[in-house]
Image (cartoon, rainbow, N blue to C red):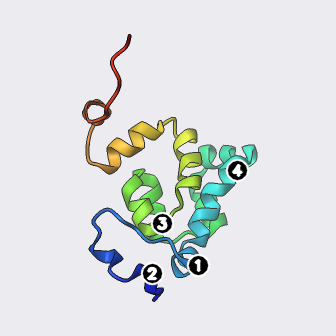
Amino acid sequence: MNPQLRGIEDLEGTYVFDVSRSVKTLRLNRFFWMYRDPAFRELVTRDIESAFAQSKLTEEEKNLVKARDWLGLVRYGVTFFVLEKFARVSKVSNLQVYASMRGESLEEFLQTRKVPASA
């Protein structure tokens, strides 16, 4: 293990993305990266099972995608950069994703933000 990561498992809410995690999740990260291609987005809309098959996703990976399990996807090893592509295509804002990851509604999440009063 990387000595810089010693004790990382004790930091609640921290999910390591290292080389081994990157290799494990390459298929799923590529699946989301493909959302930049209009033809792939159309395939997902028309026949998601074919898109899953084309990407060779495992059952666990397919279930995470279908459930839109944002925190589960991060814990699994999806990079936030491609998760944003998935959220955008799913018409979900980053704030909604963050709220979901905290187990909150968007309204509950927004109440925790420090927003300066308008002048």
Quarter of the image containing the N terminus? bottom left
* Amino acid found under the numbered disc labelled 1: Val
Q: Which mark is residue 4?
A: 2
Eye-nearest disc, 3 or 2: 2
Q: Is residue 4 above or below residue 28?
A: below
Labels 1 and 3: the sequence-earlier one? 1
Label 3 belongs to which residue?
61
Eye-nearest disc, 1 or 2: 2
From the viewer's side, name the closer residue of 62 and 11: 11
* Amino acid found under the numbered disc labelled 2: Gln
Q: What element carries label 4?
A: helix
Q: Can residue 1 be seen in this view?
A: yes
**Taking 87 as reference, is 31 left or right?**
right
* Amino acid found under the numbered disc labelled 4: Phe
Q: Do the residues labelled 1 and 4 touch (CB within 8 Å)?
A: no
Q: Counting other residues with Cα less than 10 Å from the Cα at mark 2, is it few (<14), some (14-19), or many (20 or more)?
A: few
Q: How far apart are marks 3 and 4 (CA)?
A: 17 Å
Label 4 belongs to which residue?
40
Eye-nearest disc, 1 or 3: 1
From the viewer's side, name the closer residue of 73 and 67: 73
Labels 1 and 2: the sequence-earlier one? 2
Q: How far across and down, in percent of the image, does residue 46 sit?
A: 62, 44
* Amino acid found under the numbered disc labelled 3: Glu
Label 1 belongs to which residue?
23
